Amino acid sequence: MVVLEVVLGLAFGLLIIFGGLLRWNEVRYRKKGLPPGTMGWPVFGETTEFLKQGPNFMKNQRARYGNLFKTHILGSPTVVCMDPELNRYILMNEGKGLVPGYPQSMQDLMGKWNISAVHGSLHKSMRRAMLRLIGPNMIKDQLISEIDEFLRSYLSNWSGKVIDIQEKTKELWCLSALQQIAGIETGPLANELKSEIMNLVLGTLSLPINFPGTNYHRGIQARRKIVSILEKLIKERVASPCSLNYMLDSLLRNDDDAKQKLNDEQIIDLVITVVYSGFETVSTTSMMAVKYLSEHPRALEELRNEQFDIREGKSPKDMLKWNDYKSMIFTRAVIFETLRLATVVNGVLRRTTQDMEMKGCIIPKGWRIYVYTREINYDSFMYPEPLAFNPWRWLDKNLESHQYFLAFGGGGRLCPGKELGIVEIAMFLHHFVTKYRWEEVGGDRLLKFPRVEAPNGLHIRIWDY
Ligand code: HEM
C-alpha cells in the first residue's frame, strides 16, 4: 500500500514537473503581439518534432496558426514564415535588420569570416571577390574547360559497374571544387581534404555540443585540419607564386585591387564557404536529376537528343564551350524542375537585429526567421500538377524569374554560384547521358528533410550507351 502511494506520488510529481517544463517556454515567450504558435520544451523547444516530421510539422502548424507562426527550433526562438510575399520581402530587406541567421554549429564550422556572418561593406567586398572567381566571365574563360576535363576523367570506366550515384556525385563535386580553387589534383591531399569536408558538412546541422562522438565534435576537428592544410598551402603559394589563375592564387594576389584586401584568415573562410555552399547543392541536384530522368524516359530522350545535337560536328575530344552550354535549353529546364520537385533548398534563415513588425505581429530582436520556401514549390497555381516531374513547364522563361521562385535565394544574398551550379550540373548530364545508359538497382530509400539524401546510397547499374 505504502509502495503504491510512493509510486503514485512520484508519478504525480513527475507530471507536475513535465507540465511545468512544457509551460516554461510558453510563459517565457509569452509577450503581447508575438505570432501564434507553440514553443515546446526548454532548450530543445520543438526541434525533435521539427526534424522528425519535417514538412508535416510545418503543414500542421500552418493549419493551426496560419502562414506566420512561432516555434523554438535548433536552439532558438524562431518565426516560421510560409507567406510567399513576406518571404520575398524578408530576403530583399537585409538593410532593415533582417540579416542571415544560421545555427551556431554552422557559424562555428564555417568560420567567423564566412560570407553569411559578415554584413555591410565587408560582405560587399567578399561577394565581389566571389563573383569574380565564380561568375559568368570566369566560367566562360576558364572554369568551363577545367570542369569539362575533370568530368571526362571522373566519368570514365563506369560501364559494367553498379555505383552509388550519391557517393559519386558528392566526391565528384568536392574534388572538382578543390581543383578549381587551388589546382589540387586528385590524390592523397585531395582525398584527405575530401573526407574532412564531409565531416564538416555533417557537423553544420547539429547541436553545438563539443563532445567526442558527436557530429559537431567531428566537424570542429575537421575544420582545424582543413584550416591547417590551407595555411600551409597559402605559405607555399606566397613563397613561390603559382602562374596559373586558380581562385586561391587570385585572392592572394588581390587581383581586383579591392580597397579592403582580404587577409589570410578571411581567404581561408571564403575558400571553405565556396566548397561548402557549392558542393552539397550541386551534388544533390545532380543525383536527383539522374533519378528523375530514369523514371521519366520521355524527358531523358529529349535531354539526350539535345546533348547529342551539341556533340554533332565535334570530335570526341572537343571541349564544351559557353555557347554549347547556352544552347542546353531543355537540360536547364530539367535542372530547374529537379530543384523544384526535390526541393534541394527548403528555405533560408534570417535573424532580426531589432524588434520588427510583420503582418500585425511583433518579431522580437534576436529571433530567427525561417524563410520556408518549400511549400511554394508545390503550389498548384504556379505549377499545375505540382507533384509531376514536368521539365517542359520551365520552357516558359518567365517561370525562372518568377518572383516567388527562391531556390537560389534573393536580394543581396542571391546565390553568387547560381550560374556555376547550373553549368556544372548541365555538363555532368551532358557527359553522363551521352556516354552511358543506366537503371536503378532498386530498394534505396530517399529522405527529403532536413536535407535531400539517400541514407543508404542510390545504386545504379551502368552500361555504355
Ligand atoms: C544548384 C545549386 C545551388 C543552389 C540551389 C544554391 C542555393 C543558394 C541559396 C538559396 C542561397 C541563399 C542563402 C541565403 O540567403 O542565406 C545561396 C547563397 C550562396 N551560394 Fe549558392 N546555391 C547553389 C550553388 C552554389 C555554388 C556552385 C556556389 C559556389 C561555388 C554557391 C555559393 C553560394 C554562396 C557563397 C552563397 C552566400 C551568398 C551571400 O551570403 O551573399 N552556391 N545559394
Image (tube, rainbow, N blue to C red):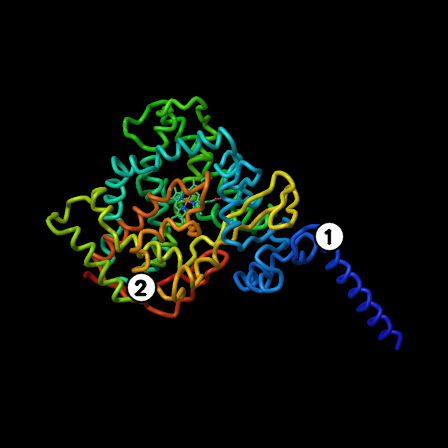
Question: Amino acid type of disc 1?
Answer: Arg
Residue in the picture at 70% in, 54% down:
42
Q: CA distance from mark 2 to mark 1?
A: 52 Å
Residue 429 x %, y %: 27, 54
Q: Residue flagged by tag 2: what amino acid is it?
A: Ile
Write the residue at 33% across / 63% down: 390
At 46% from the left edge and 26% from the top edge, which residue is drawn?
263
Reading the image, the residue beneath label 2 is: 460
Along the line of sight, the residue nearer the viewer: 9 or 358 = 358
SS type, badge 1: loop
Residue 225 visible in the shown view = yes
Q: Earlier in the sequence, mark 2 or mark 1?
A: 1
Above or below, 160 against 253 in this view is below
Image spot of residue 402 (x, y percent) = 39, 51
Q: Is residue 170 left or right of residue 118?
A: left
Name the mark on residue 190.
Answer: none
Ligand 1 - quadrant of the structure image: top left
Q: Residue furthest front?
A: 360
Left or right: residue 81 compared with residue 374:
right
Judging depth in this view, the residue of 221 and 451 nearest the camera is 451
Name the mark nearer the viewer: 2 or 1: 1
Q: Is mark 2 within 8 Å of ligand 1?
A: no
- Disc 2 on helix, strand or loop? strand
Quarter in which the C terminus is drawn = bottom left
In the rendered image, the quadrant that contains the N terminus is bottom right
Provide the residue designation for mark 1. Answer: 30
Residue 408 position within the rendered picture, expressed as x and y whole percent measured from the top left: 42, 47
